[in-house]
Every structure is written in structure tokens, then in C-alpha cells.
Amino acid sequence: MLHHDDATEEEEAVRVCVRIRPLVMRELQENQQIEWGYNDTCLLESTANGQKVYAYDAVFGPDANNERVYNVVAKPVVLKAVEGYNGTVFTYGQTGSGKTHSILGTDEDPGIIRLCVRDMFEYMAARPDVEYKVKVSYMEVYNEVTTRKPQELGCGDRAETSTD
């Protein structure tokens, strides 16, 4: 259930968060390691001139699941959306950085979209005296081509693709 106490009450227009994805099997077999240090709000880079610190609103390590990321990043946006505000959760990163896993997830680790929808409808169901109108968009921009993918969200065959 979505409650004010569960979500951070920040009035910032934009929050920037970083998620470090776990190493994939190939990287593990090659004995690769994550070279960045991190804590809850910073990435730490060791350089020849000392350590550089990059500050963010939140940093999630490779062990963070989608529910944890959702609770910190998207749940406050959903809470404001059900109160009538517009909201956007935007992911950005190079190919293979984990954006699709964060947004769509798996059956075992549902992604941000499923968790948003779950909480929105639970919130609305708990307030039967209020009438809601819900509009949701999801799109992927890859190589400057925009693809809307409602079929991946369980919306049947109403997919649209555009190059605008």
C-alpha cells in the first residue's frame, strides 16, 4: 500500500540516482570487478590524483533489487501522481547498463513500471469515493528512434512506433 510515510517528502523538481548493475556471467568468468566505490549517495573513483567523489540523491549497489530502487526513486513520483501531479521517471545509460531490467524487471524481481501500476491501483481502490483517470506512457529511445511498447505492459496489440 502506498503511504506518505513510505516515500521521501522531497520538493525537488529533479532527483538524480545511480544504479550499479551486477556483473553478468561473462564478466564474472573473466574475473572482472566493479571498479567504483560507492555509498548511499556517492560514487567514488580512485585516480592518480586521489579520490574523486560524485554526489547523487541516491546510489544503489549491485545487490539492490527493483523494489528497493522503486521505493526510493519512483514511489515518491507515484504518490504525487495519485494526488494529481504529473511525474516522470527517466532512465539513461549505455546499452547493457541495466535500464530494461530496472524498468520492466522479471517475474521474480518486478520492475518499476509494474510496481508503479500496483501501487497506483491499490491507492485508488482504497479510495472508492474518488474518481480517477489514469494515463500512462512508456517509450524507449534507441539510436534516435522512439518506440512505444504497450504490448510489453500487458496492453495487447496496441503498439505504436514512430520516428519523431
Image: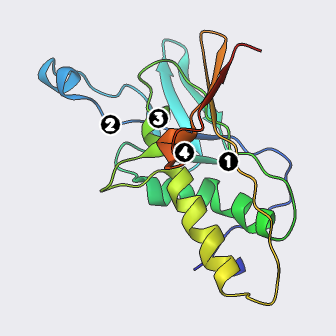
Query: Measuring 48% from the left and 59% from the top, which residue is drawn there?
Result: 68
Chain-order first, disc 3 or disc 2: 2
Secondary element under disc 1, as helix, strand or loop, is: loop
Q: Amino acid at mark 4?
A: Val
User: Residue beneath label 3, please?
Assistant: 100
Marking on residue 22? 2
User: Residue beneath label 1, please?
Assistant: 57
CA separation, marks 4 and 2? 13 Å
User: Residue beneath label 4, please?
Assistant: 59
Q: Amino acid at mark 3?
A: Thr
* Mark closer to the observer (1, 2): 2
Spot occupied by residue 14 in the image (x, y as percentages of width and height): 80, 44
Secondary element under disc 4, as helix, strand or loop, is: strand
CA separation, marks 1 and 4? 7 Å
The answer to whether 80 appears left or right of 30 in the picture is right
Chain-order first, disc 1 or disc 2: 2
